[in-house]
Image (tube, rainbow, N blue to C red):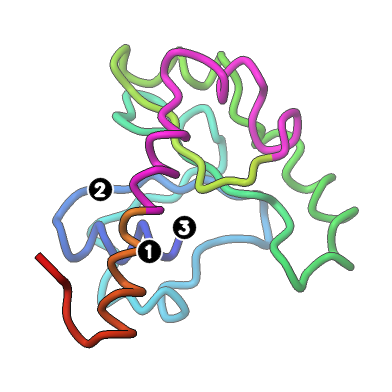
Amino acid sequence: MCNTWLQAAELLDFNVHVSTPPGYEVEPERAGLFGTDHYESFSDPMEACREADLVTTDVWTSMGFEAENEARMKAFADWCVDADMMRVAKPEAVFMHCLPAHRGEEVTAEVIDGPQSVVWEEAENRLHVQKALMEYLLLGRVEA
């Protein structure tokens, strides 16, 4: 997800703050980035959230990397998005997660179920986009 946000930032001209534990830093070439003008890296996740319009995270262990789960749980322990992180973001900031989420790991229940969370709206929008893509891929067009 981080690479996708970075690609979108480059295309749509916005800035992304990235914070990861040591050893999990952004690799610009892997993300397909042409430069580093649209993101800034922070070693402290709280600083990455400061004055943010949007705070987002993803699962710590993606499919296919289950053998790394224990190491990732230890490495990312301080990167759980919590109420303190949301408090340093802008007051109108929203929280997003592409789901499924592990409450208590990458995000607290208080945040994902809280008033700043838009995860269900995000999931609904993704559903409609996926349906449109399927129609286009199967029919070669989108019915109006």
Q: Report if residue 71 lies within the magenta region.
A: no
What segment is highlighted magenta in the picture?
A: 102-127
| Number of numbered callouts drawn | 3
Q: What residue type is labelled 3?
A: Cys
Which is more foreground, mark 1 or mark 3? Answer: 1
**Residue situated furthest left in the rendering:** 144
Residue 74 x/y as whole percent: 84, 45
Q: What element carries label 1?
A: helix
Q: Mark 2 points at which residue?
A: 15
Residue drawn 52% across and 27% down? 46
Expressed as whole percent of the image width and height from the top left, the position of residue 91 reads 32, 12
Residue 126 in magenta stretch: yes
Q: In this view, does 12 lie to the left or right of 8?
A: left
Gap between marks 2 and 1 measured at Cα = 26 Å
- Image quadrant holding the C terminus, namely bottom left
Quadrant of the image occupied by residue 3: bottom left
Disc nearest the viewer among 2 and 1: 1
Q: Residues within 10 Å of mark 2 (few under 14, many from 20)?
A: some
Q: Position of residue 49 (x, y in %)?
A: 43, 30
Earlier-in-chain disc, 2 versus 1: 2
In the picture shown, does residue 97 fall above or below 94?
below
Circle on res. 2:
3
**Residue that label 1 marks:** 130
Residue closer to the observer: 59 or 120: 120
42 sits left or right of 90 in the view: right
Residue 76 drawn at (x, y percent) = 72, 44
Name the residue rendered at 45%, 24% in the picture.
117
Query: Whole-Å distance between the Cαs marked 2 and 3?
Result: 12 Å
Q: In this picture, is 49 found above or below 137?
A: above
138 displayed left or right of 85:
left
Q: Could you tell me the amino acid type at mark 1?
A: Gln
